[in-house]
Structure formats: structure tokens, C-alpha cells
Amino acid sequence: MFDDIGAIVTGLYTTLKHIIRPSVTIQYPEYKRPPRYRFKGRHELKRYDNGLEKCIGCSLCAAACPADAIFVEAAENTDQARYSPGERYASVYEINMLRCIFCGFCEDACPTEAIVLENNYELSFYDRASAIYTKDMLIVDVPVNGRPTPQEVEPGMFNRSIPDMGNPR
Amino acid sequence: MSTGSIALWGLIVGFIMTFVVITGFAYTTLLERIVLARLQGRVGPNRAGYIPLPRGKDGRERRFLGGIMQPAADAVKMFFKEDPTPDKVDRLTYNLAPMLAIIPAIVILAVIPWAGKIPGLGDPSWGYFAIAPGINVGVVFILAITSIGVYGVVLAGWASNSKYAILGGVRASAQMISYELALGIIVLIPIMMVDAPNPMDLGVIVEAQRGLWFVFQQPIAAIIFYIGILAELQRAPFDLLEAEQELSAGYTVEYAGLRFGTFFVAEYMKMISLSAIAVVFFFGGYRGPFVDQVPALGFLYIFGKIVISLFVMIWIRASLPRYRYDQLMSLGWKVLLPLAVANFLVTAIFLVLAEEGVFEPIVNSLRQFFGLG
């Protein structure tokens, strides 16, 4: 019987030790844990260094999406008003964040590495209409050395839509 | 004092004490959440209201007493919840059961002595400060009122018209009355040890602990009493009936909103009341250093002892696994009740023998050995 009482006392002592130790809780808004390297958060449409958009409007991402969340409408590039290298660009690009399951299949399907899932996870909204992220919400800013799209370029310079790419890391 | 002024005293002091105890209950819930969290390695609620301090060295905002308004936030939430009544319940009993659960919890506080004699307050013939001082059957009053608390539980289960509720209600009432037996026998022990004309008056029991608290004179009785209180409250490790994986909130399963809040209040108020009773019987009540010169310190001592008792209850809840129902009943009937009866018999025999003078030679030789007068 005394070792039963001893077991109870040991249990009580084990929990009492935790009052003295600091707690493991992370106080969220004051300190945010940095996400992991391959964390799949909010989408972004990337650009090249000269300012042209990488997205060529092929809608392979929309075909790959298991939740049918992406809507792509393509339009034709001209050399006077060029948005992306190659013949097409995405004139309408919408992702419905309420349907998206953040699986990353669109990122895997994209031939130009245009749509990428970044680290932002703070994505709340107040009504369903604000859940549809349009192209201007998803596209990144023009990099320092680039020009904003639509650009006026020399004819024949950007004919190839998919660049030479290395193996994925 | 005339009857009218005694009634007025009871009314005013009772009103103030109820208000104090309800605030105490609110902060007991906060104490439970914070202490339970710290024992489990996390922090409790610390967002709901705080006192801002000047900014620290690195510009961070510093908060003092974060989470102090959490009980108010919980109360407001409980008020705004929908309060449905299921279709085929027994209306009168369904509405009456929460009242029968909470009223005994608060009424017990009427006979507890909160402080010693405060000169100038109340009738000079009263020996202590209480809402109803001078009741010379205070212990019987407490046992009777605790037994009424069982009605709230069983009627709540029965009126809910649901098989899980009635199973939970019947099991809870069986648990409560089994442990009330052991409690009833244990309270006889301090009564026997008090050598006064009205030993069942709670203030007299506290005054008799002037020399040494009863917990040091009767440790086994104090332990049995504390275990009995934990079982009476249906608190861990005896909380099979309110564990979510078991009968899914037991007898309160058909209650929601404010009525469920009433059961919740009843449980925590009973925690405070029964802790107060345990403190009065075994841990010296309002006795403490300097309480004879400054009687108002008695309030502080009894309050501190009740808080320590609540902390031990929460500590036990965080640490121990729960008992199965048959293990619980066998503990109450086969272990605690015989131990209580045996303790009672041994105490009674020793007291009679001491009165007859059987121990005089031993006590005298011990006194000579230690050189006392």
C-alpha cells in the first residue's frame, strides 16, 4: 500500500516541477515562428529580372488543380505590348482561396515556375467575395532592374516562352 | 440584540458575503485555468484584460495581470448563448434542478466563521464573525444542506428525458451519498475532541484549535475528509461523470447556455464551500499569527487557506488519472468507511481512557523525563 501512496506522491511532484519551469507556449502575435523551407502558403505569380511576367497563360495549373480553384484566361502578346515572353500571357488569373487546398500541384505543373506557394499564412477575410484573389493581388512587384509590363520590346527578342531550366533542387 | 436586528445583520452580511464569494468563484475559474496550464507546461489565458506597464528596454509592450478580465468575458459569452429547452422534458423539474444544485452551495457559507470576535460589530455575546453566528448545531446544518445538493444532480438527470443523462444522474448521486457517509463520520472526530458545552458550533471548533490544528492531531481523519470532499464535488480523480469521453457531460448533457452555467457555478461554489469546511474543521479556520490582537487578520488567514486548498485540488486534478466507477464505489465503501469508523472508535476509546486517568502515569513520567512542570 505504501508504494501506491509513493506513486501518487511521485505523480504530484512531477506536475509540480512544471510550475517552476518556463512554459513552452509561443505568444503568437508578438512572436511568430518562421515557417519551414518548403512551407506551402499564399500563391505568388513571379516575374523575370527584366520585368516580364513568367506566366504564359497555358492554364496547366488550372488543369492540375484538384479543387478546381484556378481560372485562367489567356490573351495574345504583341511586341508593342508584351506581358510575358512567348505568344500568350494570362489576362485573367483568379484563384479562389476558399477552394484552394494548398497542395502545391499548380506549382509542380507550371512549366515556367511562375506560380509559387510562398510563406504567408495569415489569410483571413470577412466575406466570400474577398476570397477570390485576382492577378493584381497575386503578381509580385517589378524587380529593381526591370521595366513594368506591358513593355515595348524589339521584335523577335522574346519568342521562346519556356526558358532553359536546370533540374529542380 | 433583538430579533429584527439579528435578521438585518444576517441580511446585510449575507449579501456582502455572497457578493464576495461570487467574485471569488469567478476568479476560482481563472485560478483553475491558469494553475492547470502552468502544471502542464503552458500558460493560461493571458489576453483578456491587463494593466499596461511602461515599455521595457527593447520597446516591447509589457503587461501586468494579463487575463484578469477572463471571467467577465466568459460570463458575457454564457449570457449570449442560446438557451434551448428540449421538447419532452419535465418543465418544472428541468428548471428547478439547477437551482437545487446551486442554492446549497451558497447556503453552507452562512455558518462558517470568517473571523474571530471583532469588537463593536454585532452582539457582544457572539464568539466569532459569521453570517449566522451562534447556531449551536452548525455541523448538522452543513451535513443536511450537503445532502440537499444531491437532489439537484439526480433531478437534473431525470428531468432531461435522455438515457445518458439519467445514467449519469443516478451514478453521480450514488457517488455523492456514498462519500457523504465517510464525511459524516469524520466530522464527528473534531466534535469529540472539542471540550466545550456546544461542540457542534463551528466557531467553537475553530477556537479549540488554538493550540494545535486538528490536522496534526488527526492526520488520517484529515486525509479521509479531503478525499471525501474530492468525491463529493465530482472532481478529479473522481470525475468519471463529467469526463467528455465517458457519459459525455453526464447529467448536464441536455442543458445549455445559462442553465449549464448554473451547474458550472454550482460546482465551483461547492469547491469553495467544502474547502472552507475542511479548513474550519482541520486546518485552524481563521487562526494564525497575531489574530488575537488584530481580529480582522482572520479574514486573510481563512482566505489564504481556502486558496491553498483550491490549489491542492487543482494540482490533484492535473496529476492523477481518474478512477473507474466500480473502483470509486469500492474505495468509498470498502476503504474509506471502515477507516473512518476505525478512526472514530480509536479516538473515542482514547478520549474516554484519558478522562478516566489511565494515561496519567505515562504522562507524568514523560513530564519528569523532559523536565517540564
Image (cartoon, coloured by chain):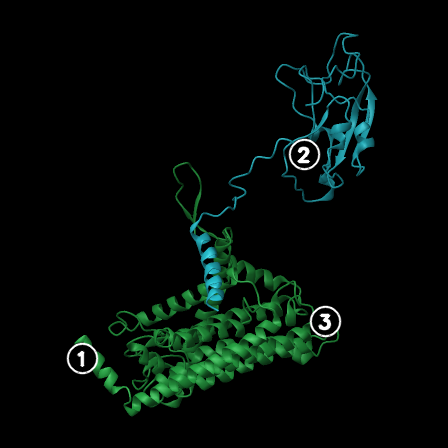
**At which x and y percent is residue B175?**
58, 76
For badge 3, the amino acid type reads: Pro
What residue would you read off at disc 2?
A: A42
Dots 3, 1 in contact, CB < 8 A: no
- Which residue lies most toward the bottom here? B356
Chain of residue at mark 1 = B
Label disc, if present, on residue B368 of the rendered structure? 1
Query: What residue sits 51% from the left and 71% below the top?
Result: B230
Q: Looking at the image, which is closer to me, B297 or B120?
A: B297
Q: Looking at the image, which is closer to me, B326 or B317?
A: B326
What residue would you read off at disc 3?
A: B86
For badge 1, the amino acid type reads: Gln
Few, some or many residues within 10 Å of mark 1 (<14, 14–19, 20+): few
For the residues labelled 2 and 1, the Cα–Cα distance comes to 87 Å
Query: What residue sits 61% from the left and 67% below the top?
Result: B242
Residue B362 placement: quadrant: bottom left
**At which x and y percent is residue A111?**
77, 22
Determine whether the residue tagged by mark 2 lies in a helix, strand or loop.
loop
Residue B331 placement: quadrant: bottom right
Q: Are marks 3 and 1 on the same chain?
A: yes
Determine whether the residue tagged by mark 1 lies in a helix, strand or loop.
helix
Few, some or many residues within 10 Å of mark 2 (<14, 14–19, 20+): some
Query: What residue sits 46% from the left and 83% below the top?
Result: B341
Q: Colour of chain A?
A: cyan
Q: Are marks 2 and 1 on the same chain?
A: no
Image quadrant containing the C terminus of chain B: bottom left
For the residues labelled 3 and 2, the Cα–Cα distance comes to 45 Å
| Residue A99 is at least partly visible in this image | yes
Few, some or many residues within 10 Å of mark 3 (<14, 14–19, 20+): few
